[in-house]
Structures are given as C-alpha cells and as structure tokens.
Image (cartoon, helix red, strand yellow):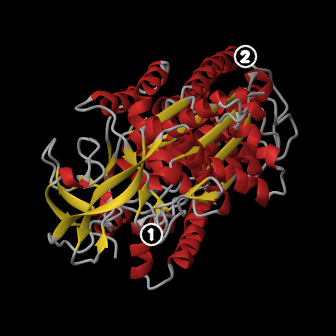
Amino acid sequence: MARILITSAIPYINGIKHLGNLVGSQLPADLYARFQRDIGNEVMFLCATDEHGTPAELAAAKAEQPVADFCAEMHAVQAKIAKGFGLSFDHFGRSSSAQNHALTQHFAGKLADAGLIREVEDRQIYSNADQRFLPDRYVEGTCPNCGFEKARGDQCEECTKQLDPTDLINPRSAISGSTDLEVRATKHLFLCQSQMKDELDAWINSKSDWPVLTTSIAKKWLHDGGGLQDRGITRDLDWGIPVKKGDGDWPGMEGKVFYVWFDAPIEYIAAAGEWAEANGKAEADWQRWWRTDKGADDVKYVQFMGKDNVPFHTLSFPSTILGTNSHNEKAGIPERWKLVDHLKSFNYLNYDGGQFSTSQGRGIFMDQALEILPADYWRWWLLSHAPESSDAEFTWENFQQSVNKDLADVLGNFVSRITKFCRSKFGEEVPSAGEYGPDEEALIAELTTRIRAYEAHMEAMEVRKSAQELRAIWVAGNEYLQATAPWSTFKTDPDKAAAQVRLGLNLIPLYAVLSAPFIPGAADKMLAAMGVEDRSWPKDVTAALSKMPAGHGFTVPDVLFAKITDEQREDWQARFAGTRD
C-alpha cells in the first residue's frame, strides 16, 4: 500500500470561489484522492482557507465585522460548499491556526540561521488617499513586460512575470483607484531566493514527469530577465502571523506580520497538525506525512493548482523547505521536511466569452451552482473539460450537451433500461438462467482493457483522458445492450436473455465503483439501488461482474440524471450573464 499526500491550492477567504477556481485545484485533487483511496492506498488530502493579508482586512471592513470573526464565518461557508461538492478532504484547515503561526515562525527562524533572510530598507508604495502602505497586489497598473493594463504589483496575470509595484506604469491604488501614491521607506525581511537558484534549477530539472506548463513557468521565473529575485516575506499589516524568529522576538520587526505568500504554503503542513489535534492523534501521526526523518520518506506528495500559483510553489515554498533542510543538515539536526514530488498545474477556465473573476463577480460561483443542480453535474463537466493543455471555456450550450449526452443518455439511460427491462420480465432480482457466451466474453475483454487504460490515466493525473475512458466504458455497456437486444432475445430464448440481463445488471455496480471518483453521489445511488455494499476496485473484471449473483434483489433507481432543457439553459444563461452582487 502506497502513501499519497495530496494538497490543493488553498482558496482565499475573501469570498466564495467560482467554478474556475474549483477545477483549477480542489476538484482534480479530489478526483485523484478518491481514486487512490479506492485502489487501496493510504491518502492524506489537505486543504485550508488562506486567511491573511489585506484582502481579508478589506472584505471584513466591507462586511463591518472584525477580521477574525469574518474569517471564521467565511471558513465555515467555504467548508460547507466544499462538502456540497463532495470534496473529500481529510482536513480543511485555516492558515490563521495556532499550528501555522508556530510553523511559520519556526521556518523563518531556521532560514535566518541559514543566512537566507536579510533585512532590507525597502521602498514601498504608500497611498495618501488610503493612508496606508499598499501590499503589492493592491497596486495596479500597466505591465512593463506585456502592456496588460490591469497587472498587479506582485505579478502580471497576463504574462505571469514577477513584478514589484514600482515596476508598474501608471500605478494606482486597487482600493480607492487613487493615483496619489508615493514611495516611502520601511524595513522588511527578504527571503534570499537568489542564493537557492542553482539548487532550485537542479531540482526542477529532475522532475521529468511534471507537466510542461509547470516547468515552463518555473524556468521562466528562474532565468528570464535578471533571473530569480529575492522576495519580501513581511508586510506592514495588523492581521497576520507576527514576525518572530522561532520562539524569540525579531528586533526591528515589531508590529509587522509575515507576508501571506510566505505563510500560506506552510499551512499545508500545519493543516496536518490541525488534523491530528481535531482527531485526537499524536504529533507523530502528522509528522509521518511531512518529515522524512519521522517516516515520510516513502510518501508521494502531489500538489494541484492553477498556473498563477505555480511560481510560488515551484520556487518560494521549495526555497523555504530546501533552505531549512540544508541548514538542519549542516547543523547536525535530524529535522527534514518533505518536498513536493509532482505538481499538477492547470490553465484557466474562461466563462462564456470572457473570464471568470472573483473580484468582478463574473461567472458561476460554487454556491450558485449547487442551488440549480446537484454536484455531480458540475463535477462531470468540469473534470471532463479540465483546462490541462490550454485554457478551456465554459458555455451553457456545451454544458447542456455534455450533461445530456454523457450523463443522461449514456450512463443514466443504461441503468434505466436494464433495470426496468429486468423488472418487467424477471422481477426485481437477478435472473439465474442462461450462460455467458461470446458476446459476454468480448465485453469482459474490452472492459478489462479499458479499465486498465483508465487506471493508467488516473495514475498519471490525465484528467480529460480519464473522463474519456470512463465514458467509453459506459458506452461499451450500451453497445452491448444494443447488439444483444435482450428484449428481442427474450421472445425466442428467455434463458439467453436472462444471462444478458444478469451481466447488464452487474455492470451497474462496476460502473458505480469506477465512476465514484468523478460522480460520487450518483455512484452511491447506483450501489444502494443494486443492494451492493462491496466497493472494492475491479482488479479482476470477471469477478467484479459477479457482485450481484442470481437471486440478488435490487430496486429500479430514480432517474440518475435529468436532462437540461432548452428553457433551463436559456434561463441560467440570462441569470448569470451579469455580475454577482
């Protein structure tokens, strides 16, 4: 049994996420986690809310709440929505947790001891209109690299180039829009990423199985222009993790907090500590996932995220881990932390001719999606159209077509046809007559080949290919029914029809198990209707197709997937054409 550690990019606390956020990290991570559990591996799947930084302060102020109260409330909202989508986190934590405070301060102290943090007399943008220093992402302007007019002060979303606010052309406050900005002196701590460049380069070069999207973005940041730059890890804010050097104070850094991009990835580790505390586990129980000196040397660690998060996860967070491990090794300290083994990144999902946008309220948001349709409809469409090799686009026409053809016509129709036919001719139990012949043997052979291909795609985290293969497995059952036509066979050879029906019924629990990572709600309904509790993965297809022996009772399930009508599509298209309030 392998041990698989999985993290998805942690969603920011300042609002409910849209479907583009969902398919870019949490949903494919859940697909992989469910598959790994189903095939018998031990999985730790962690996520959290990212709660620090100016956006949290501003959102709390807008809601007229203390920021801590706002974050607690929004964490509960996001956790409820995640549950609604069937996201099977082992723990959904909070970056404001005591565990993350302690770990962030711990890593900062280690990096300081290693000579990888330096104090800088920094010049930072101050907004006279807002009467505050502006964090990088709250300065907007024109990108000097590509000319994008809404680049942020930390990174251009258009060309992904790392920026400083002072690089922007015609900068303005993203809070008030004011251009009355000035540069003021303030002291901050910088992580010396530039010292880690060669080590990072060698580490990234060793990842030959990573998506090209991941490595190309990392290489761009490493080598373009002046190469990898040192990065500020502190901010002049009230809300955040206080700057400390391990357990001790950090002279000159009083009143400052760690930059959200420094503490947020550390929350992946802290979430495991939160999990242990919440479940009455010992410290060793979470350390065996994260410390290679405590048993994590056999763990495979996989991260899922959108392409905009790749630079910080291939460079900044690894700098923290590599620097800490290097220091500990030189100091003779056994403490070693786990580095990511595979980073699965995704392009953007666009919305109906434009872009999804949390800040602009454009598109369909996770809570709205669940209000109009069950989670499985969205899970199937998003995963089967995952933006892996390029950006993808959500359109209502395509969504309707995919749901109606794949879920209703292929899977739902198969289940309905075979169960209703059996009920009409043999009753609500598996018929016993007849033997399997060449048609059944051919189907079993095809399914065996396809299931092994499906497994290979899932192991490789090829999301679209996995969906295509799963759909082909469903189609094989429909084609079998069409070719054998038990409703016609019954007229001349009822025993042969009984065998055909027996195999058809047994395809339902097989399909349920195989489909569960994609559409867990429908899978549960299929298994419940068939009266099957055995959810074991079909290593032997012939054996898997005997979970419902002769005489086994079942019920005809309700419609698994209702078709989306043209009227519904038009209504939703109009409803979500504007922006969210």
Amino acid carrying label 2: it is Gly
Reading the image, the residue beneath label 2 is 437
Which of the two marks, 1 or 2, is nearer to us in this view? 1
Cα–Cα span, label 1 and label 2 = 64 Å
Q: Is mark 1 on a helix, strand or loop?
A: helix
Give left or right: position of 339 versus 465: right
Vertical position of residue 418 compared to residue 149: above or below:
above
Cβ–Cβ under 8 Å for marks 1 and 2: no
Which residue, as the protein is rendered here, is positioned at the far bottom? 64
For the N terminus, the quadrant is: top right
> Residue at left 65%, top 16%?
445
195 or 259: nearer the viewer: 195
| Earlier residue among tags 1 and 2 | 1
Q: In which quarter of the image is residue 30?
A: top right
User: Where residue 192 sits in the image (x, y, percent)?
Assistant: 42, 39
Reading the image, the residue beneath label 1 is 56
Q: What element carries label 2?
A: loop
User: Where residue 68 sits in the image (x, y, percent)?
Assistant: 55, 75
Residue 510 can be seen in this image: no
Residue 390 can be seen in this image: yes
Amino acid carrying label 1: it is Ala
177 or 254: nearer the viewer: 254
> Residue at left 72%, top 42%?
422
> Residue at left 58%, top 35%?
302
User: Where residue 537 sits in the image (x, y, percent)?
Assistant: 74, 31
Give left or right: position of 2 versus 558: right
Which residue, as the protein is rendered here, is positioned at the far front? 251
> Residue at left 46%, top 47%?
23
